[in-house]
Amino acid sequence: MKGIIRFLLIALTLIGHAAPTLAQEVSISDPGLNAAIRAALQKPTGRLTETDLLVFDYLSAVVSNAARVRAHPAQWLPWNFHQALVTEGNTS
């Protein structure tokens, strides 16, 4: 379990350094949802971008496929995890 947590922390750090200047801004009209997302991202102010929200997509995929991540961690990096999902026919 410690290995997967370490893996997630490294991967999320890499996502955070993705080119934020190229990302589209996202507007969340529901104040409660906006506050919850900002709290989860630890981003209380500033623009929310598509890149910011990709963290949730990535985390969901990794948590849902924890056994596969442990078996083949290199296939579950932020930039290639979608291919691992498609390989198994799982697009969640």
Image (cartoon, helix red, strand yellow):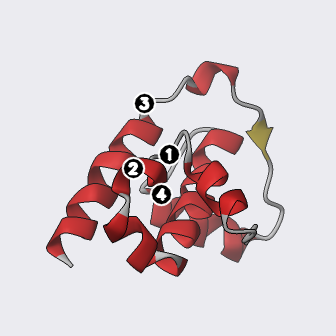
For mark 4, does the 10 Å Cα neighbourhood hold few (<14), some (14 to 19), or many (20 or more) residues? some
Q: Nearer the viewer, residue 86 or 14?
A: 86
Q: Looking at the rendering, which quadrant does residue 61 occupy?
A: bottom right
Q: How many marks?
A: 4
* Amino acid type assigned to the residue bearing label 2 in the image: Leu
Task: In this rendered view, identify the residue nearer to me: 89 or 19.
Answer: 89
Q: Write down the residue under mark 2.
A: 12
Residue 58 percent across, percent down from the top left: 55, 59
Question: Secondary structure beneath disc 3?
Answer: loop
Query: What is the CA distance from the residue labelled 4 to the residue labelled 3?
Result: 13 Å
Residue assigned mark 3: 17
- At a point 59% along the width and 56% down the height, the residue shown is 84
Q: Which residue is mark 4?
A: 41
- The crowd level at tag 3 (other Cα within 10 Å; few <14, some 14-19, many 20+) is few
Decide which of tag 1 and tag 2 comes sooner along the chain. 2
Q: Amino acid at mark 1?
A: Pro
* Position of 32 relative to 11 (above/below): below
Q: Amino acid at mark 3?
A: His
**Mark with earlier residue (1, 4):** 4
Circle 4: residue type: Leu
Q: Position of residue 5 (x, y in %)?
A: 25, 68
Q: Secondary structure at mark 1?
A: loop
**CB contact under 8 Å: marks 1 and 2:** yes
SS class, disc 4: helix
According to the picture, the residue beneath numbered tag 1 turns out to be: 78
Residue shown at the point (72%, 59%) measured from the top left: 86
